[in-house]
Image (tube, grey):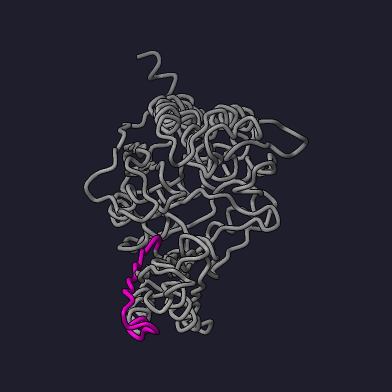
Amino acid sequence: MVILMNTLDMVRKQPARFFLAIGIAACFITALCLPLFSATTVPVGSLAEKETAAFLQTLKELVAIESGSRDREGLDHLSTRIGAHLAALGGKVEFVEPGADTYRMSDTPESPGRTVLAQFTGRGTKRILMLAHMDTVYPKGSAAKQPFRIDGNRAYGLGIADDKQGIAMIIHTMAILRSMNFYDYGLITVLINGDEEISSPASRGLITRLGASHDAVFSFEASRVDSDKISLATSGIAAVTLTVKGRASHSGFAPEKGVNALYEMAHQILQTRDLSDPSVGIKMNWTLASAGVTRNMIPPSARASADVRVLKVSDYEAVERKIRERVKNKLLPDSEVQIGFEQRRPPLEVSQAAKALAAHAQAIYRETGKVLVVDDQPEGGGTDAAFAALNSRAAVLERMGLLGFGEHSDQAEYVLIDSIAPRLFLATRLIMDISLGKVLPSQ
């Protein structure tokens, strides 16, 4: 009763002071009921800077494990370590072995590397797929030539740019989100495969299926040291094999009794040499050839290979049809000619969804004081991101990784250390903005 009488007296004599006290009390009570700060106000840039040292430590660990595409032992070792990192961050991890849907090509090993698949479940609705690969082009025993080392702004190492930095990017992006207690996404799926360098024969089907069920796809191949960019398009890659069967005979005593497979191969190469069409981005070039057994024998067999690049998935069929039609015209009627056509990678074609997300990425990147280049012209190389885009309307961004140089080099592969924080900032903010509905309208 005394408290009530005192309160009424304050309202009558000092109303302004009373309502100020009430306001302060309300703010205090509200602060007790809410977190110290919301996830969206956390200084992501500062967290990205702090993550740099741990990032370099992860790179050192990844580079130390050799993981050539045909080194199953090394790939299993590395995938186990990657899985442990992702599980420690809260991911549900599984290892996907090559299955019946493996696309067998001429160079596909009997047992390609397995895929690390991790899923992080949030409380939102948006679904984001992040891709990287653990396999390299280097034969086993190459590590001694490229140990991890830091020289100024460069971190060197075996496969560091292609694509172990991409693995580290994913791990430490998830680490930042976890440290911020940010779970406003619906699902983040991480896929790190062990067969990318051999055209992803075992993982391509899984990547395609996942791409169709996600709203956005980030592929963490490295960007370029001479162009701080992301890519929206890449070329598709196919391989043509020409196999000719002739008949052996002594090249001095009875050449006329033979069927010269070398002649037939040369004829077929020459009559298909003009199938490139620069106006639509089709490139076909014969690059390898072999024939014969010994100098004084009419060659009984010959083989040649061609590299094909396209900008549209539909161009594959047109190129293959033209080749098969041309080879019906034989120089030597008794020869046997066979054509093999492998679709090694589809092209990544530019989409409006990717353009919109890329524009948002540029705005985010400007907050770091840097300019992000968006490259919407197809590059010569292929990408796993193209498999993700094959049956999907998702926005797909390639080259989300660090700035790097020297991929497939035996001595000079490196990444730029000062690109770690800006690229972590970009990936983290994109995930946050997609999750919070600031970009990517409902599809």
| Residue 70: percent from left, percent from top | 43, 40
| Residue 375: percent from left, percent from top | 57, 65
* Residue occupying the far left of the picture: 100
Asked whether residue 347 is in view, the answer is no
Foreground pick, 208 / 235:
235
The residue sitting at 57% across, 28% down in the picture is 64
The correct choice, above or below, for 38 with respect to 256 in the image is above
| Residue 69: percent from left, percent from top | 45, 42
The residue sitting at 54% across, 51% down in the picture is 400
Foreground pick, 161 / 357:
161
The correct choice, above or below, for 245 with respect to 179 in the image is below
The quarter of the rendered structure image containing the N terminus is top left
The correct choice, above or below, for 280 with respect to 368 in the image is below
| Residue 389: percent from left, percent from top | 37, 61
Q: Quadrant of residue 317?
A: bottom left
The residue sitting at 69% across, 52% down in the picture is 225
Task: Read off the magenta span.
Answer: 326-345
The quarter of the rendered structure image containing the C terminus is bottom left
